[in-house]
Image: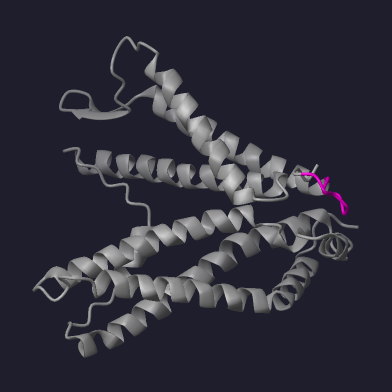
Amino acid sequence: MKNFDLHRFGQTFKSQLLMGRNFWLRLFVIFFLVLFFAELMFTESMGSNVFGYYTTSVDNAVNFGTFFFVISMLFGATSIFSVLKDTRSRITYLMFPASNLEKYLNCLVMSTVVVALVTFVAFFCADTIRTLLAPAFGHEMVWGVPSFISSLIPDSSYSLSAPDVDKVYQWWLGFIMEVGIILFFHSLYMLGGTAFRRQQFLITSMIIVCSMIIIVSILGHIDFKENINLMTYNEQDGLVVHPALYVIMVVMYLLTCFNYWLSYRIFCRVQAVNNKWLNV
């Protein structure tokens, strides 16, 4: 079988999406209810009737929505192969007339793009209904969706008093760094969702937290000769970027690619009958 065929990929995606429509509808309802009641809790709490406080309450609700969006994306990454929960589902999916790459990419799109769309539409509906009901509670209509969208866009602005050319270069460096961090953690959760068969989100989160604690502890015991400023600006040299920043970015993107590749290789070794904690 050809390793990748765009038409077959589209048919596989359409078939998988239709078969899981009840799951996506149920997920949307759950997300909508959580976000709607969370917005009511933030906006109708004690003191929300004070002048000017309602706008702050809406901002708090938007911050919660952003946090919920991030968690839903990480949870979706670990649930990349939710279609392989039981033996019957595994056999059905693994025997589907498509290549391993097409099956993997279908699950990848489902766990990222579709989960992101479901979460965004759930927040949009919850925030819109809360806004329309605001006059009934004696509030002005403050829509939180624009703030929610802007909070999802990486903000790479810095307070360095640099010329415009340096600011553009500085913005791109910050943007590439932030996107790299997002992709890196997403690839870690994707790898955990592929490797572990049960409790993927919990186990992956515990491993990441423990690893970060160990790394921070090791770095805390290292006596650096000088303070490292990754990005500085002075009148004489202009924008100065420490070589360590470039090294960090390259290593991070290489590790991200490796995590996605390893996730795919593990998927290729998934067994139909497996009662172990690992999928290999």
Res. 108 image quadrant: bottom right
Q: Is residue 236 left or right of residue 80?
A: left
* Image coloring type: one colour
Q: Is residue 191 left or right of residue 182?
A: right
167 or 155, nearer to the observer? 155
Residue 219 image point, x, y percent = 41, 20
Residue 48 image point, x, y percent = 17, 72
Check if residue 182 falls in the magenta segment.
Answer: no
* Quadrant of the image containing the N terminus: bottom right
Q: In the figure, 239 relative to 118: above or below?
A: above
Residue farthest to the bottom, as pictured: 136
Q: Is residue 63 left or right of residue 274?
A: left
Residue 247, visible in the rendered structure: no
Residue farthest to the front, as pictured: 46
Q: Is residue 33 left or right of residue 205?
A: left
Report the residue at 29% width, 82% height from top: 131
Check if residue 273 falls in the magenta segment.
Answer: yes
Residue 229, visible in the rendered structure: yes
Report the residue at 53% width, 30% height from top: 251
Res. 44 image quadrant: bottom left
Residue 76 image point, x, y percent = 58, 59
Report the residue at 41% width, 44% height from top: 178
Residue 34 image point, x, y percent = 44, 71
Q: Which residues are magenta?
A: 269-276
48 or 155, nearer to the observer? 48
Dominant SS type (magenta): loop
Residue farthest to the left, as pictured: 51
